[in-house]
Amino acid sequence: MKYVSTRGKSEAVGFAEAFAHGLAPDGGLYVPESLPSIPADLLLEETPMPYPALAWDFFNLFDTDHDSDELIALIDESYGSFAETMTAPLQQIAENLFILELFHGPTLAFKDFGLQLIGNLFEHQIRATGETINVLGATSGDTGSAAIHGLANKEGVNVFILYPKGRISPLQERQMTCTAAKNIFPIPIEGSFDDAQRIVKELMGDLEVKKKLRLSAINSINLARILAQSIYYVHAYMQLPPENRNDVHFAVPTGNFGNVLAGWMAYKMGLPVEKFVVATNRNDILHRLFTTGEYESGDVHPSMAPSMDIQIASNFERFLYYHCGEDGKKTASQMAKIAKSGKLKLPNFDPDIFTATRCDDDDILANIQRVKEEYSYVVDPHTACAFQEIDPDRTTVVLATASPAKFPNVIKKAIGETPTDPLLEVLKKRRQKRYPLEPDAEAVREFIEKHSA
Ligand SMILES: *Cc1c(COP(=O)(O)O)cnc(C)c1O
């Protein structure tokens, strides 16, 4: 299987290369040259396969670079650390209503599904090439901790994660700073997430620096991350009772459009789905897109679901590519329009099987209360967004993207309870290790050079 750029101007590459580069040289995102079909017999299974077995069947369709034994080892190691035997268990909370729990990984959020695998792919790449790497990223919380837990104590890689000092939750900070791993460097800086991101972009954008420091990125556009996430949609389907398999709606809390895109790709590969509900918080760029056909980014407003406080949906480009009939030239010209004017009106917009909802902070609190009252289930503030509008006559699978224990203050405000998790309690007793730096690319560059892998 080869991978091509959404902007059509880069050479097709294999899986390992698409993975290692993240972004294609023409600035586009990698997509499979053609989408394979999910083997039909998988979808007829009445009992779900073990998650690693399914993941292996699925990745076999895409990753033709690693041999079978390598791939099995990578997958087993990635999902072996999950606390639940089902890895992504499906809980039924009403006749037509199910919750797919994606928070049983080491950082209690769904990003572990992509980043555990990415960590092992990096490790494998380092072994194969003999070249050490330095991973650099910026985070507003969950991505950084998931990346750190995917790469902690791995040979040949050091990890530098910038985050805005005082602007991520204390628990999220502890998840990054309390690993006790020698290769992890959490870097608080004064300023906002955008300031952190700007420094990362500046260093990654300087090809000389990037090469000299052997920098690699962990970001939401890496195709391996998306594909890893497609798998749990299939796994959810396999856990549904047969009578619930004909009218499935997936309700997905969304920021960067990564998670829901992963589901849509599974649908394009043959997974029977009736609708995807794109659930946003008050940062509603995707809600506006799917209700009006217009994509326009605005200012970011902080919300109670902070991992969705995003106004540029990085993975939108992949959707656009398919929307343009897999035409790289057309996609590139539409992306150029966005770069120039910050917006794009899609002509004859067809939302395909997407619908969208929007949720402000009051709705988030109300949804947490309602779900607790009606179903005796506690959802985190991101998952709460997906409960905004549910069609009672259809089968709905809500994706629970984080554990409520990660957001004790919001849950307390909503229902007066403080959820906990032993993984987080342990962190509270550990010493934090932080490397504060000036919000300045040169200072970060010097630091990486000094602590390079
Ligand atoms: C990152 C994140 C999201 C948003 O996911 P996207 O793939 O960016 O759409 C939702 N919920 C939680 C808890 C997250 O960490």
Image (cartoon, grey):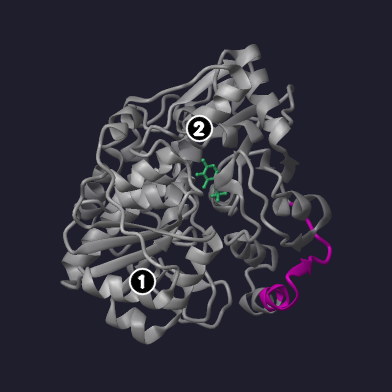
Q: Nearer the viewer, residue 160 or 151?
A: 160
The residue that appears at 52% across and 81% down in the rendered structure is 26
Q: Which quadrant does the C terminus fall into?
A: bottom left
Q: Does the magenta stretch include residue 15?
A: no
Crowd tier of the residue under label 1, counting other residues whose Cα lies within 10 Å: few below 14, some 14–19, many 20 or above: many
Residue 83 shows in this picture: no
> x%, y% of residue 398?
59, 31
Is residue 207 left or right of 26 when viewed as pictured?
left
The residue that disc 2 covers is 407
Residue 82 shows in this picture: yes
Mark 2 is on which residue type? Phe
Would you place residue 124 above or below residue 244 in this image?
below
Is residue 415 left or right of 336 when viewed as pictured?
left
Q: Is mark 2 on a helix, strand or loop?
A: loop
Mark 1 is on which residue type? Val
Q: Which quadrant does the N terminus fall into?
A: bottom left
Quarter of the image for residue 342 reads: bottom right
Q: Nearer the viewer, residue 339 or 33?
A: 339
> x%, y% of residue 122?
27, 61
